[in-house]
Image: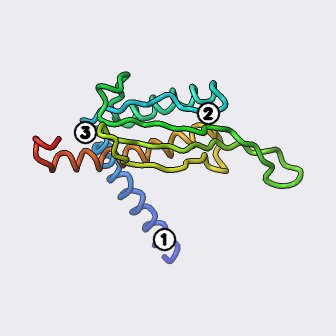
Amino acid sequence: MRKIVPVLLLLACGIFAVAMLPAQIATHETMDLKLYVSPLEGPDAELAKSIRGKLIGNLEKHGISITESKENADAILSGSGLMQSSFATSIGHRPTLRIHASMRLVNKNGVALWAEDVSSSRYAVSESSSFVEKVTSKVADALAEESKRRSSEPIAQR
């Protein structure tokens, strides 16, 4: 009996988490803001181009509308210093690669909505996917807040 209670508790938590997932996704899907992703800057142009493409795809997958024009955008995502570093985790082990960049999201008036130095997870299977997931999550949250703020202000101020 004592072993059943923790299992039931875990099962209940899992069901609750799955039930909340559509609400979180719906928040991002209903945003009416358009995002422009600037070309990323860094010493490795191919890496920057690849990360930008993955970012755009992942942001769209999360219901964020991407525009190819800065003029049509409600917000602009930019990043600089994009680099890949390598270091050994311990003697005798292969080096681990990490991606680092300073990312910034501003609205069309130039007001910062989010800015942060982002790194891929140390233990990620794919460094670029880890980096992209972190940025996507932060951008989605910031755009949801901006959308909420805009919907509560008078039309004349938008």
Mark 1: give few (<14), some (14-19) or many (20+) Cα within 10 Å: few
The residue pinned by badge 3 equals 30
Question: Of callouts 3 and 1, which one flags the residue occurring earlier in the amino acid sequence?
Answer: 1
Farthest front residue?
110
What residue type is disc 2 on?
Gly
- Binning the other alpha carbons within 10 Å of mark 2 as few (below 14), some (14 to 19) or many (20 upward) gives some
Between the C-alphas of marks 3 and 1, the distance is 37 Å
Position of residue 141 relative to residue 67, above or below, is below
Q: Secondary structure at mark 3?
A: loop
Disc 3 versus disc 1: nearer the observer: 3
Residue type at tag 1: Pro
Residue 108 drawn at (x, y percent): 30, 36
Specify the quadrant that holds the C terminus: top left
Q: Is residue 69 left or right of residue 90?
A: left
* Horizontal side, residue 49 vs residue 13: left or right: right
Q: On residue 42, which mark appears? A: 2
Which label sits in the foreground, 2 or 3?
2
Q: Residue at x 37, y 47 (%)?
A: 112
Rendered view: 11 above or below 78: below
Residue 31: % across, % down: 26, 39
